[in-house]
Image (cartoon, grey):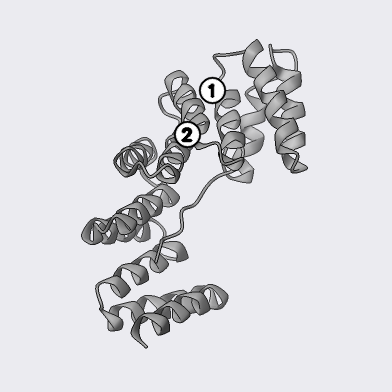
């Protein structure tokens, strides 16, 4: 049983996306290609968006938003090694780019590079201590790696920040299932049920399969 990792699109959450675009204007090098690529991305035309982001990067190679979004396109196309390269380039330009660290961790995880993935998620939470998605991604990698106590710690830390963060409860349920602790797994299910009854059904089904 594998845990589920969270990936951002674009710069991050939707409210952050506009701020990202505002950092690059049409008058700047690569700006026209960048905004065209963003529109193509919204329309789901990823290969066309990739070509435009690459043109933007060739004209403005030291813009962290261009590099990050280029990484996201590679990531969504399943080209994880290239995504890693672009996330690292974004981070080299902007060392406080929490979303880039988070997505770097996701790309490393997709390549089976657990140590590098954990390192990236930890750095994301250092830059942005309340980054619950990165904390749960960290917990998920620990869980998938069999480091259950570390997974519990990371999930609980996410819940200290956001007590209603359903994915962290789900990760805890997975951990307790693997640890054969049915009572604890059901307790996590009950918490999910209170917040998201639809998501709770998936958790309950996993518990039933594990302990049937």
Of callouts 2 and 1, the N-terminal one:
1
Instruction: Give coordinates of residue 116: x percent, y percent.
Output: 33, 37
Horizontal side of 53 relative to 63 (left or right) equals right
- Report whether residue 158 is seen: yes
| Quarter of the figure that contains the N terminus | bottom left
At 46% from the left and 53% from the top, the residue drawn is 5
Horizontal side of 69 relative to 142 (left or right) equals right
- 10 Å neighbourhood of mark 2: few (<14), some, or many (≥20)? many
- Image marks 2 and 1: residues in contact by CB distance under 8 Å: yes
Looking at the rendered structure, the secondary structure element under dot 1 is: helix
Q: Which residue is mark 1?
A: 64
Q: Is residue 35 above or below residue 147?
A: above
For this orientation, the residue located farthest to the bottom is 212
Looking at the rendered structure, the secondary structure element under dot 2 is: helix
Q: Is residue 159 above or below residue 103?
A: below
Residue 100's label in the rendered image is 2
At 24% from the left and 57% from the top, the residue drawn is 147
- 10 Å neighbourhood of mark 1: few (<14), some, or many (≥20)? many
The answer to which image quadrant residue 208 occupies is bottom left
Instruction: Give coordinates of residue 92: x percent, y percent.
Output: 43, 20
- Report whether residue 157 is seen: no
């Amino acid at each position: 049983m594998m845990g589920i990792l969270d990936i951002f699109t674009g710069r991050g959450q939707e409210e952050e996306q506009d701020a990202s675009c505002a950092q690059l204007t049409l008058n700047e090098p690569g700006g026209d290609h960048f905004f065209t690529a963003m529109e193509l991305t919204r329309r789901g035309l990823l290969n066309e968006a990739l070509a435009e982001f690459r043109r933007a990067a060739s004209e403005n190679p030291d813009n962290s938003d261009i590099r990050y979004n280029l990484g996201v396109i590679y990531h969504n196309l399943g080209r994880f090694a290239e995504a890693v390269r672009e996330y690292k380039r974004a981070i080299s330009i902007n060392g406080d780019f929490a979303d880039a660290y988070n997505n770097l961790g996701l790309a490393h995880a997709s390549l089976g590079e657990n140590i590098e993935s954990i390192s990236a998620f930890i750095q994301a939470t250092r830059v942005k201590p309340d980054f619950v998605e990165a904390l749960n991604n960290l917990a998920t990698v620990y869980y998938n790696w069999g480091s259950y106590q570390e997974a519990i710690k990371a999930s609980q830390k996410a819940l200290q920040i956001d007590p209603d963060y359903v994915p962290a409860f789900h990760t805890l349920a997975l951990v307790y299932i693997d640890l054969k602790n049915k009572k604890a797994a059901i307790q996590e299910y009950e918490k999910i049920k209170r917040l998201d009854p639809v998501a709770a059904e998936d958790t309950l089904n996993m518990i039933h399969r594990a302990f049937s």
